[in-house]
Image (tube, helix red, strand yellow):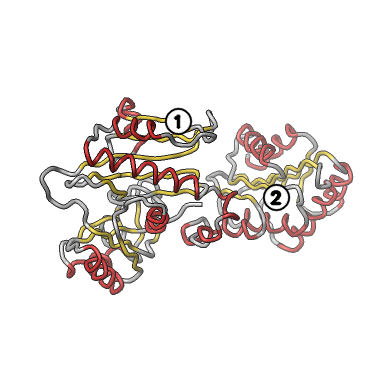
């Protein structure tokens, strides 16, 4: 589960990570009040207005309606309201949102931390994530803060430092110091970075996160280390242990079809293809998508109805797939193990009748427990549903309906 920057920073702060302070607002008037509050608490007189969407590249992105960037600087209190108005309610397009962009419902009014001093501020990149290849957490750091880490990895991979943490032992002092040394820090800034890394790792483990990305981590001109931005992803499977974090979920940032599928107990991910698929089991779903591609089509979705598929879940799956205007055919591929094929077949027939006008071809492939009975139910239904026995047949029939 992704969360907003302002939410991520609150979590980090609760674990002792120093952050760029800010107050969230959802109207221009509230943005002005947030700026006043921030001035009282921090003394800042310049304010950074940051669009809150689940996507990176906000500073370079543009709000379609006004042409404003997603991150702007207000150099006085009078500028806060108009600049917040240019962002709020608009559609922000970045390299991560795609051309459709995302609507901005909130902005974070943050303190200006790039204040003048004896030396220039410096930006770093720091993240913690799970390396599934080694089964360990890995800290990634770079002196090239503020840039996309993908670009740094491609153009200057030598500027990325990685430190693997054995989860049985945890982060050791020498490892945090090694990362800080690799960034060329010394004195108070070095000590601050070591402390920052320990606090960040503590937050990462305590929240069951799958990724913490701080880009940039800022060394201020007076050698303080703090998080200017924060991207946090929490493992969905651990949310039952973190009810407070689960409540931070922003459904407006998620695909409506995926949200609807979740309410029906379905695992659904929308894709860009033309063949909808409904399958029980993630592995079979991946194989089904391969079959669709081999048949000349492109999968329109990943949809796993799970082992307990029934008429209700099948109907819910149908309705979700049919809401995608790109779908030209539907392939249902069920292996009857936990769930019987005749039960799924009855669900398909019942769902077809309940939904009514289904104008796309449907191919149903059933194998496993009661597969023959299931195929007979499909064939005797009188509906425009084609039955298949083996995957090759299913692929050929998908090819036929697309041609």
First reached walking from the N terminus: tag 2 or tag 1: 1
Q: How many marks?
A: 2
Question: Crowdedness of circle 2 by 10 Å Cα count: few (<14), some, many (20+)?
Answer: many
In percent of width and height, residue 304 lies at 67, 47
Circle 1 is placed at which residue position?
Answer: 164
Pick out the residue farthest to the top: 158
Q: Is residue 291 left or right of residue 227?
A: right
List x then y, in percent, for residue 173: 39, 34
**Which quarter of the figure has residue 193?**
top left
Residue 326 coordinates in the image, percent (x, y): 56, 50
Closer to the camera in the image, 235 or 43 = 43
Residue 6, how many percent across, how many down? Answer: 37, 58
User: Residue at the left extreme?
Assistant: 118
Is residue 148 found left or right of 362 in the rendered image?
Answer: left
* SS under mark 2: loop
Q: Residue sitting at 64 percent across and 37 percent down? A: 286
Q: Is residue 151 among the parts visible in the rendering?
A: no
Task: Choose mark 2 or mark 1, whichever is in front.
Answer: 1
Please tell me whether residue 213 is drawn above or below residue 15 in the rendered image. Answer: above
Residue appearing at x 27%, y 73% in the figure: 33
Q: Quadrant of residue 132?
A: top right
Task: Give me the C-alpha separation between circle 2 and circle 1.
Answer: 37 Å
Give the structural element (helix, strand or loop) at label 1: strand
For image coordinates 72% across by 56% down, the residue present is: 313
Q: Is residue 75 left or right of residue 252?
A: left
Which of the pair 53/391 is nearer the observer? 53
**Which residue is disc 2 drawn over?**
305
């Amino acid at each position: 589960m992704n969360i907003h920057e302002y939410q991520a920073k609150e979590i980090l702060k609760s674990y002792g990570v120093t952050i760029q302070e800010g107050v969230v607002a959802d109207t221009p008037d509230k943005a002005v009040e947030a700026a006043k509050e921030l001035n009282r608490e921090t003394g800042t007189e310049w304010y950074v207005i940051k669009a809150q969407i689940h996507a990176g590249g906000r500073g370079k992105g543009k709000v379609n309606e006004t042409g404003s960037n997603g991150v702007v600087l207000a150099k006085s209190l009078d500028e806060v309201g108009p600049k917040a108005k240019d962002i709020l309610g608009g559609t922000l397009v970045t390299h991560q949102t795609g051309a459709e962009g995302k609507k901005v419902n909130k902005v974070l009014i943050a303190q200006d931390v790039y204040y003048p001093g004896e030396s220039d501020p410096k930006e770093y990149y720091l993240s913690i994530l799970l390396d599934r290849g080694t089964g360990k957490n890995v800290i990634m750091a770079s002196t090239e803060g503020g840039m996309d880490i993908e670009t740094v990895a491609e153009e200057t991979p030598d500027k990325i430092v990685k430190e693997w943490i054995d989860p049985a032992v945890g982060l050791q002092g020498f490892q945090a110091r090694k990362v800080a040394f690799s960034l060329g820090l010394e004195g108070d800034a070095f000590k601050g970075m070591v402390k920052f890394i320990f606090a960040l790792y503590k937050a990462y483990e305590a929240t069951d996160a799958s990724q913490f990305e701080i880009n940039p981590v800022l060394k201020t001109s007076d050698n303080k280390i703090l998080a200017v931005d924060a991207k946090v992803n929490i493992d969905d499977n651990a949310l039952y242990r973190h009810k407070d974090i689960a409540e931070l979920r922003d459904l407006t940032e998620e695909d409506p079809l995926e949200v609807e599928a979740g309410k029906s107990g379905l695992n659904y991910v929308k894709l860009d293809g033309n063949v909808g698929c409904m399958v029980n089991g993630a592995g079979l779903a991946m194989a089904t998508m391969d079959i669709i591609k081999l048949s000349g089509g492109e999968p329109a979705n990943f949809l796993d109805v799970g082992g307990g598929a029934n008429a209700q879940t099948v109907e819910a799956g149908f309705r979700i797939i049919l809401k995608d205007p790109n779908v030209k055919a539907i392939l249902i591929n069920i292996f009857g193990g936990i769930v019987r094929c005749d039960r799924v077949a009855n669900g398909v027939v019942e769902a077809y009748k309940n939904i009514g006008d289904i104008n796309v071809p449907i191919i149903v492939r059933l194998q496993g427990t009661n597969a023959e009975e299931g195929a007979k139910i499909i064939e005797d239904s009188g509906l425009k549903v084609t039955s298949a026995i083996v995957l090759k047949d299913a692929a050929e029939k998908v090819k036929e309906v697309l041609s």
